[in-house]
Image: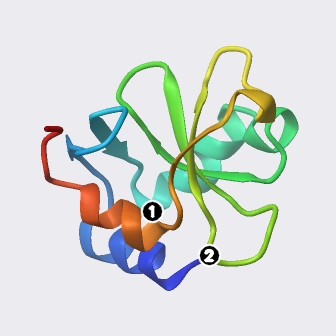
Amino acid sequence: MPEAYLAQLRSSNGGEGDLSVEPGWISLWRAEEVLSMNSAYGVGEFAHGLWGFGSNGGGELLALDVRGGEPYPVVMVPFIEMALSEAQQISDCFDEFRDYIGRSAP
């Protein structure tokens, strides 16, 4: 996992708030929930290569796309009918994504 993601997880251990890019809101999972949430939503089965870390508080998973090398893009994919073909990139890497956290959309 990228250091920026691990640092965010260590410092916040979850939380919710504004996100200045689409989807406009983030709900980060707590460290102790990350593995079980990925399993419960079937991320490995339905979207192999993604590593979920939260949601938009509604119907979409927020995840790192770990299929390629670092830096891993951050993507959004629907929970219902989860498929890699539905993934939308919302940032080039977690460092960039972290800069969007806590800022409201323009």
Colouring used for the render:
rainbow
Percent position (x, y) of residue 74?
54, 54
Closest to the camera, between mark 2 and mark 1, is 2
Up-down relation of residue 45 to residue 79 (above or below) = below
Position of 56 relative to 44 (above/below) = above
Q: Residue furthest bottom?
A: 3
Q: Is residue 79 above or below residue 13?
A: above
| Residue at which label 2 appears | 71
What residue is pinned by disc 1? 31
Per the image, label 2 sits on a secondary structure element best described as: loop
| Residue kind at label 2, given as amino acid type | Pro
- CA gap, disc 2 to disc 1? 21 Å
Q: In front: 6, or 102?
A: 102
The residue nearer to you, when weighing 31 against 64, is: 64
**What residue lies at 46% left-to-right and 77% top-to-bottom?**
6
- Residue at (53% x, 62% y) in the render: 92
- Where residue 83 sits, quadrant-wise, is top right
State the SS at label 1: helix
Question: Relative to the observer, which residue lies in front, 34 or 59?
Answer: 59
Where residue 57 is drawn, which disc sits there? none
- Crowdedness near tag 1: few (<14), some (14–19) or many (≥20) residues, C-alpha within 10 Å: some
In the displayed structure, does residue 15 sit left or right of residue 88?
left
**Mark 1 residue type:** Ala
* Residue 22 place in picture, x, y as percent: 36, 35
